[in-house]
Amino acid sequence: MAVGKNKGFKGKRGKGKKVVDPFTKKEWYDIRAPSMFNVRNCGKTPVTKSSGTRIASDSLKGRVFEVNLADLNKDEDQAFRKMYLECEEVQGMYCLTNFYGMSFTTDKLRSLVRKWQSLVEAHVDVKTTDGYVLRLFCIGFTRKRPNQLKKTCYATSAQIKAIRGKMREVMTREASTVELKELVNKFIPEVIGKEVEKASQGIFPLQNVFVRKAKIMRKPKFDMVKLLEIHGDIGSEDTGKMIDGSEKVDPLGVGKKVVEDAEEPKKVVGDS
């Protein structure tokens, strides 16, 4: 019946559904970064508590976290890099993560692009020794030669093509001979960028050469042992010292005094 047709009808009666704060059903898990970074506890993440067939840990697995490298290594000079960490396993209230990707902040990329120089970019797919396939993106800029008076330092298309080939060659060589953990350690001090600068010196001098982005295309089958190796301090809590059964343990440290008191005969009042 329409509300306007019947004057006595005032719509639905009774209270509406009670609004419940969704965060009352959440619990917080600590995010554990791999051992290649200085700061291991890099944040917290909420998840709905386990109920029925829904398990909280299943909701956390595969979750990707974006963390600034300056926070992970306590170094403000590395603030232009963003690291992506993927949760692969949940132990207790800890999310054990692994490297998932890396990129530059937008403001850093914009600050590198200037007038009167050529921009050179290249990308290549590489496979590490432990089975990860990554796509690496390299960026570089031409610079003036020593004692150059000309304002511009543009490279020809043939030179750009040759530099791009050197970039691919260096990235493939540096990435295909190491494991993922060692490759991530090469990103931080920009080892690959310096190698590209050296390799292309004979073609055209470069500056500001970086691996600006890395993303994982394919991963090997999940291996719990390898993940625990990356998180080396998990399960290494102090469990105490093994005690030999022959040793007499005195937890209070008063055993000697107790024995002396026990050997001393008690005096009875009135005893001559």
Image: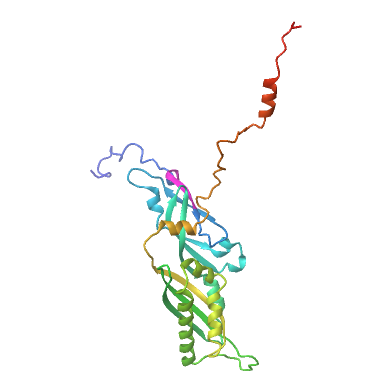
Magenta segment main secondary structure: strand
Residue drawn at 37 percent across, 52 percent down: 58
Based on the picture, tell me whether residue 25 belongs to the magenta stretch.
yes
Which residue is more in the foreground, 139 or 109? 139
| Residue 172 showing in the rendered view | yes
Q: Coloured how?
A: rainbow
Which residue is more in the foreground, 125 or 222? 222
Residue drawn at 36 percent across, 43 percent down: 51
**Where the N terminus falls, by quadrant?**
top left
Based on the picture, tell me whether residue 225 belongs to the magenta stretch.
no
Q: Is residue 176 left or right of residue 37?
A: left
**Image location (x, y in percent) of residue 206:** 56, 85
Question: Is residue 227 depicted above or below 216 in this figure?
Answer: above
Which residue is more in the foreground, 269 or 195? 269
Q: Quadrant of residue 73?
A: bottom right
Which residue is more in the foreground, 87 or 242? 242
**Image location (x, y in percent) of residue 205:** 57, 87
Residue drawn at 49 percent across, 86 percent down: 163
**Where the C terminus falls, by quadrant?**
top right
Which residues are the magenta region? 23-30
Q: Is residue 121 left or right of residue 52?
A: right
